[in-house]
Amino acid sequence: MNKITAEIRSLAQQHGATVIEHLAHLALHGETEQVQVAACKEILDRGYGKSLSPVAASIMTPKSLAEMSDDELSALLDGIELEAE
């Protein structure tokens, strides 16, 4: 961390408690529900860390040779032959 970043972090931390108190006030008494939700989210992110985003994935497991069709086996052999050349 460079000197400027350290100075900014130090200044921000000096106001951390006051800012959290202000966020808590907004979370409870904000003029709109949108303001209240945003303040709640900020407090929770700082207290518990940001929530993880779900990731959709599929895992393909290789078939055994016995499960492969003739076309799949042929394609596999073609690939092996190309690598051997």
Image (cartoon, rainbow, N blue to C red):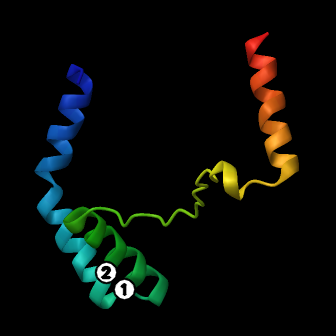
Q: Please indicate whether residue 83 sits to the left or right of residue 53 in the image.
A: right
**Pointer 2: what residue?**
26
Q: Please indicate whether residue 29 sits to the left or right of residue 48 in the image.
A: right
Marks 1 and 2 in Cβ contact (< 8 Å) = yes
Tell me which amino acid carries mark 2: Leu
Using a 10 Å C-alpha cutoff, classify the residue at mark 1 as few (fewer than 14 neighbours), some (14 to 19) or many (20 or more). Answer: some
Residue 17: name its quadrant. bottom left
Q: Picture coordinates of residue 83 (x, y %)?
A: 74, 17
- Residue 70 lies, with reference to residue 8, above or below; the image says below
Q: Residue at x 36, y 86 (%)?
A: 30
Quadrant of the frame with the N terminus:
top left
**SS for tag 1?**
loop
Is residue 32 visible in the rendered image? The answer is no
Q: Picture coordinates of residue 78 (x, y %)?
A: 84, 29
Q: Picture coordinates of residue 7 (x, y %)?
A: 18, 31
Quadrant of the frame with the C terminus:
top right
Towards the viewer: 61 or 35: 61
Q: Exactly how many numbered labels are in the figure?
A: 2
